Image: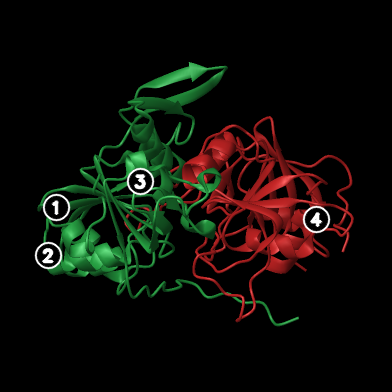
Chain colours: A green, B red
Amino acid sequence: MKKVVKDADEAISDIQSGSTLMLGGFGLCGIPENCIDALIKKGVNELTCISNNAGVDDFGIGLMLKTRQVKKMISSYVGENAEFERQLLSGELEVDLIPQGTLATRIAMRGMGIPAFFTPAGYGTEIAEGKEIKEFDGKMHLMEMALQADFAIVKAWKGDTLGNLVFRKTTRNFSVPMAKAGDITIAEVEELVQPGALDPDEIHVPGIYIHRIFQGEGYEKRIERKTVSLPK
Amino acid sequence: MALDKYGIAKRIAKELKDGYYVNLGIGIPTLVANYIPEEIEVIFQSENGMLGMGPYPTENEMDADLINAGKETVTVLPGGVFFDSAESFGMIRAGKVDLTILGAMEVAENGDIANWKIPGKMVKGMGGAMDLVASAKNIIVAMQHTNPKGESKLLPACTLPLTGVGCVKKVVSDLGVFDIKDGAFVLLERAPGVSVEEIIAKTAGKLIINGEIPEMEA
């Protein structure tokens, strides 16, 4: 079983223009920095990107927007990005905005082999337009479909050569459900270890979901909003 | 005098009960965490995937891997726990979160809320607001009573695209506290020094005033 690849360039080498990608992270927290850089270097375009946010102007998916590689974003919140706003208003970029829980669950359902589910989120709003509506226990629900992606790209804290992943703090966010949902899932990790080095009781994503893994380098881990308390 | 944003947050903090799991939205709701009565214990849920959210870190404690749903650096309290976003919204949808406090651009007398989109202007997205308002057991809105043009944000019906329908139970504005009940705003308390007449003048939706309305306790 060979899941380990050399670096991000090798991991994304077969991603073609027009592909649908899931990109893990919440804001800039836990984003796959190495693979985003590699996608920019490779220059693939017409991408559909499923990601909770679209990065900021000069980091994360924002970098791929700047190079005009993204045709469509599927997200829940896309503020804080001037280039995004410009492309959206000029019609260069398509955007599908989805309630955050619905987005997370549409991704998670793909990883569970469930094609659709019902949620009350968005009932009575423009999100409900054109969707099947059904009442359960006196409450109205919308039918939402699982989301497919050709590739899911996530960043974990540690991983072993079999693809088992462990995340740190709030970086699990969309990365865990995406890791399980990709037709092909690529994981970049801060530390790649041998099988047995991770406690089986503490693995967040079992390796069965992961197709390629590599140890990334040079993580910037930029913070979007530095908020501090005064020292005690 | 009308309340400032700290005053609104302080008043909402009185609605918290011991043992509550609470989700705080961005803006004034975030400030509520500063005014929790000492005798009660509440646990804050951040929908990106954390229970037991603590205060902002010091410069030295700051960790890029630890943020809240507003993408701000935060800390985690002892007993806190991390999970993924799908699980986070699972617990929201399943009604495990006792109280959601969020801001709004408009609230209607039937409990409808609009807070995510102004057509023709930039659309940033709804984030987790639609999921939260559709499933929370109790929703309190924290907001200014009027918009910057001086127009009432408590309306007969929302004019902006809706975030959720018939879900808001209570509004705390800079002018007063209102229950939403049977298709009307029921005035419960006035902000210190604010008259019932001023509240009537600035509330476009149906307003119910039963007897003498007490002034909010400081």
Residue type beneath disc 1: Ile
Residue type beneath disc 2: Lys
Tag 3–tag 2 contact (CB < 8 Å): no
Residue type beneath disc 4: Arg
Instruction: Establish whether labels 3 and 2 are both on one chain.
Output: yes
Callout 4: residue from which chain? B
Query: Residue A34 at what x, y percent from top left?
Result: 28, 67
Please name whichever residue, B100 or A171, is drawn nearer the observer in this view of the structure: A171
The residue that appears at 31% across and 45% down in the rendered structure is: A210
Instruction: Establish whether labels 4 and 2 are both on one chain.
Output: no
Residue type beneath disc 3: Ala
Q: Earlier in the sequence, mark 3 or mark 2?
A: 2
The residue that appears at 55% across and 60% down in the rendered structure is: B68
The tag on residue A179 is 3
Tag 1–tag 3 contact (CB < 8 Å): no
**C-alpha distance separating marks 4 and 1:** 61 Å
Tag 1–tag 2 contact (CB < 8 Å): yes
Q: Residues within 10 Å of mark 3 (few under 14, many from 20)?
A: many
The residue that appears at 59% across and 63% down in the rendered structure is: B27
Q: Residues within 10 Å of mark 2 (few under 14, many from 20)?
A: some
The tag on residue A42 is 2
Left or right of residue B75: residue B106: left
Q: Residues within 10 Å of mark 1 (few under 14, many from 20)?
A: some
**C-alpha distance separating marks 1 and 2:** 9 Å
Quarter of the figure with the N terminus of chain A: top left
Q: Which residue is mark 4?
A: B190
State the SS at label 2. Answer: helix
**C-alpha distance separating marks 3 and 2:** 22 Å
Instruction: Establish whether labels 4 and 3 are both on one chain.
Output: no
State the SS at label 1. Answer: loop
